[in-house]
Image (tube, grey):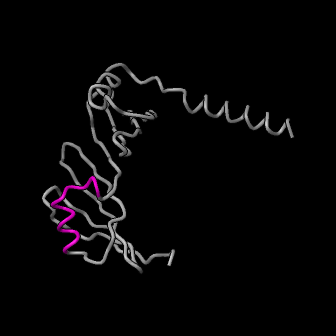
Amino acid sequence: MKKIILSTALLLGIVAAISAAPYDVNQKVLKAFNRTFATAQDVVWHEYEDMYQANFKQDDIQIRAQYDREGSLIQTIRYYGERQLLPNIVSKLKKKYSGREIFGITETSSDEGVAFLVTLKDEKNWYVVKSDVYGNLEQTEKFRRADK
């Protein structure tokens, strides 16, 4: 029994050390990231062919920030709940989709602007509604709930 516990502890330690090892993110990117997201927590970096991506939490919101190699922010993707969504969008969603619950929001922000994908649910279905900052709504998908 002691060997199993010791082996498990050792394995968890190795996995934690490997997952905590940061990528060699260049200084331009790190400087830009730290200026923009000074209070970021639990930052994990990923390196791709033409960009770096930081996954982290800030103010209880899960965020992905993508930077080019020169340190310019390409895009952010934020995941959050109804409390953080713009009130004008919440109001329009509640009016147009009454009886449906806001399950989660994916917000993307880039040079092209800000867009919101809102997932709603009711007793039978999931709905995906796209919105801009002005609350112009467009239902893009509807799925039958498999958990009911």
Q: Quadrant of residue 83?
A: bottom left
Q: Position of residue 129 (x, y in %)?
A: 27, 67
Q: Is residue 51 left or right of residue 1?
A: left
Asked where in the image residue 32 lies, by quadrant, the reply is: top left
Q: Between residues 89 and 48, which one lies in front from this camera angle?
A: 89
Residue 18 locus on image (x, y percent)? 60, 30
Decide whether residue 122 is among the magenta residues.
Answer: no
- Residue 56 image position (x, y, % from top left): 41, 38
- The residue that appears at 27% across and 49% down in the rendered structure is 108
- The residue lying at 16 percent from left, 62 percent from top is 135
Q: Is residue 25 above or below residue 56?
A: above
Side of 142 where 5 appears, left or right: right
In the picture provided, is 123 more to the left or to the right than 10?
A: left
Is 28 drawn above or below residue 15 in the view shown? above
Q: Quadrant of the N terminus?
A: top right
Residue 92 lies in magenta, yes or no? yes
- Residue in the image at 30% along x and 32% along y: 37
Residue visible at 28% across and 52% down?
A: 107
* Residue most extreme to the left: 134
Across and down, in percent, residue 142 comes to 35, 74
Looking at this view, is 102 or 114 the one in front? 102
**Majority SS type along the magenta span:** helix
The residue stretch that appears in magenta = 83-95
